[in-house]
Amino acid sequence: NARLAIQDRTTIGYLGDINSGASAVSIPLLNRAGIAQISPASTAVGLTSGGAGSSPGEPQKYYPTGVRTFARVVPNDAVQAAAQVRLQLSAGCTRTFVVDDDEVDGQDTAASFEAAAQSTALEVAGTQSFEPRQGSYGSLAAAVASSGADCVLISAITEDDAAQVTDQIATTLPHALIFGSAGLAESTYTDPALGGVAIAIDPRVLITVATLDPHAYPPAGRRFLVSYAQRYGAPQPYAIFGYEAMSLMLSAIARATDGGHRPARRSQVVSAIFHTHDRRSALGTYSIDPDGDTTLESYGVYRVVRGQLRFLEVIHT
């Protein structure tokens, strides 16, 4: 997709990607072409900063020109990690085992969680990556059980057998609470009819995702959710972030062209995005900081109920 965008001289902006692994590939390509990029859902810390949770060489390796061209409207994994730690402590967790799918998003969320837990009473009992599409994860479940953990964090995306991993861990640790990262906030993880987790373990599963309860959004956000539902059915959690990514890009183009009265130039659209301050949006009021991160810092907590995500609370970090 990034290469197709680059080959088109009229490309003025790129919306995406939906996960950090894809963004890690597309950002340097688009950066070389000077094309503005806004992601609705790529949360890896290292895409924008070198803080806790990032890998060596991040974020500089994504910006060969030395100029930032990537921004996101979703809070990054450092915010999610802080929310996860607070949630688990409030749920009574003392020792959490962290399982990730060895993908960019999974590893980043896991590393960010470990860093966030260090200064708290929550102990990380162990960490382990799993290889997707193995069919059986009995040895992984046994390792988690032997750690003495009373809680488990599954940091993964649904396509990587996260539901199967969860089911086997839940069977091996029948009393452990299970927490999921934002990559699992999809019906393909929550609904057994779509390959999701067994309904029997629903009461033990809590998922953090940046999407909030509809009533927590300003009027513009509530209107969007109603309109989306009327046209397409119940929105997946990231629908509103996709809408805002598009809206911010259109706003930047309008600002860069004086409402369409001047030619659209890529560098000016990039500049307009990074000069976004106190923007009143469907998500609420936010700014884009010099690294490309949003100033929004809230995460929603969802419980799985009969295969569906049900909003529980919001955590402000």
Image (cartoon, grey):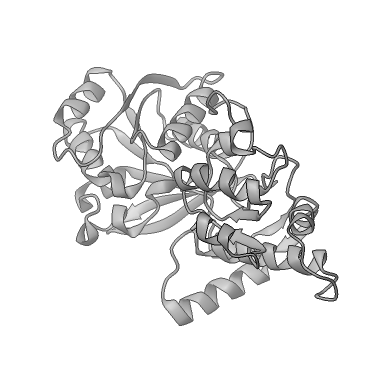
Instruction: Locate residue 306, reporting x and y percent.
Output: 27, 59
Q: Decide if residue 12 is in sight here.
A: yes
Q: Quadrant of the C terminus?
A: top right
Residues 60 and 108: in front is: 60
Image height of 140 relative to 170, above or below: above
Q: Is residue 314 left or right of residue 91?
A: right
The residue depicted at 53 percent of the width and 28 percent of the height is: 53
Q: Is residue 315 visible?
A: no
Depth check, front residue: 111 or 68: 68
In the rendered image, which quarter is residue 119 located in? top right
The residue depicted at 24 percent of the width and 33 percent of the height is 175
Instruction: Decide if residue 259 is on the left or right side of residue 210.
Output: right
In the displayed structure image, the side of residue 276 where residue 50 appears, left or right: left
Residue 71 position within the rendered picture, expressed as x and y whole percent measured from the top left: 65, 49
The x and y percentages for residue 77 are 54, 38
Residue at the extreme bottom? 231
Give me the residue at 77% from left, 67% from top: 264
Q: Nearer the viewer, residue 179 or 64?
A: 64
Residue at the (28%, 19%) spot, across then down: 148
